Image (cartoon, rainbow, N blue to C red):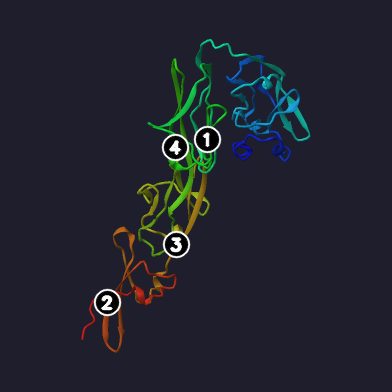
Amino acid sequence: MSQFLQSHGVPTHSHREALQYCPHSIPRFVSQPSPTSVHIGDSQVMACEVNFDLVPFTHWEKDKEALELSDRLIQLPSGALVISNASQTDAGLYRCVVENVGSSKSSDEAPLQTIPETGGERKLEFLVQPASVAKLLGSGVLLPCVVSGYPAPHIRWMFGEKVLEESDGRVEVVGGGSLQISNITEEDAGIYTCVAENSNTTIETQAQLTVQVPPQFVKRPVNIYAHESMDIIFECEVSGSPAPTVKWVKNGDAVIPSDYFKIIKEHNLQVLGLVTSDEGFYQCLAENDAGNIQSSAQLIILDHGADHGVEVERAPHLQRLLVLNATVRGSIPILGTLAACLSPHFSLPISCLKTVDEGQ
């Protein structure tokens, strides 16, 4: 439980001791715990909302002693404390504390009173409902669902149209009804519904989980060697969620689409009618809410005088075709077609030659 809370930005007491924080803002309580009561066996929420960047440095105290969290006592991402299946031992004075480097700030102290269950019907109501959220691939999420009422409700979760089953500690219901998911995968994205029901009524609420996946290269740009006036294409194919935005940079300057520089097939960069000044390093930059990546390749403009008798022609899809006339094994002419086999020095691997007519 403590490992999960730490992975979700909610520290345990021992973990807090190792934290150090340089504040970007002065701790401020947006909401604080207030006096309240709870029926034995029911659930209650003690409010505590602070600056978002301070939530990981917030913990709770009961009667001025650190409160140990458990499956029954959980701290929500907002900082609030959930007490489920309340017992008489939960009665006391509660406050939340923000620990800074060498100092701390406490909220107002508020009493929680426990009330014996009388058996009278109490309408089911949500004390806290889940909200749609986006989380990074591999991280964890806590979808809160806290319900009060009598008879005590049974809470179950739906994923899409199917009942969600708990599995190997990765998917668990904690705090009387909140759903925690660890090590999120892309398959976890979707609509989650919290259903609370007793013998009298059923209520439900839902939220969407979006899984963010950092950009990844499906195809990277590669070095290209070409002559002036040729057309070339740098390929760049990326995946990620949300769909990454892609831009091109040449020698550190952004490439602006024009009559000569075109973005084709989503993210590929086409350069038309090469001139000497087009030579340089080209970078494909991809970014989304989950991260960013870059990959670079070099464009080298070849000197026509260095052809050494090799004829270079333009071809569809910018594949360079070379027609090589050579004499091997005496006087046997061989016509070889080489596709994208050029090295910077026009060395021609034997594996690139395709014999068309060997003769007699």
Distance from label 3 to label 4 (Cα)? 38 Å
Which one is in front in this view, the residue at disc 3 or the one at disc 4? 4
Q: Residues within 10 Å of mark 1 (few under 14, many from 20)?
A: some
According to the image, label 1 marks what residue? Answer: 172
Disc 3: which residue = 223
Q: Which residue is mark 4?
A: 189
Q: Residue at x 45, y 39 (%)?
A: 188
Q: Which residue is mark 2?
A: 355
Q: Residues within 10 Å of mark 4 (few under 14, many from 20)?
A: some
* Tag 1 near tag 3, CB within 8 Å: no
Residue flagged by tag 2: what amino acid is it?
A: Thr
Please tell me whether mark 3 sits on a helix, a strand or a loop: loop
From mark 1 to mark 3, how far is it between C-alphas? 49 Å
First in sequence: mark 4 vs mark 2:
4
Residue sitting at the far left = 360
Question: 36 or 130, which is in the foreground?
Answer: 36
Q: Residue 50 appears in which quarter of the rendering?
A: top right
Q: CA distance from mark 2 to mark 3?
A: 27 Å
Spatial separation of the CA atoms under disc 2 and disc 1: 65 Å
Q: Name the residue type under label 4.
A: Ala
User: Where residue 315 appears, x then y in whole percent?
Assistant: 29, 62
Residue 249 lies, with reference to residue 67, above or below; the image says: below
Secondary structure type for disc 4: loop
- Residue sitting nearer the eye, 100 or 85: 85
Residue 284 x, y percent position in the rendering: 47, 51
Secondary structure type for disc 2: loop
Which residue is at a point 37% across and 47% down the rendered structure image? 266
Q: Residue type at mark 3?
A: Asn
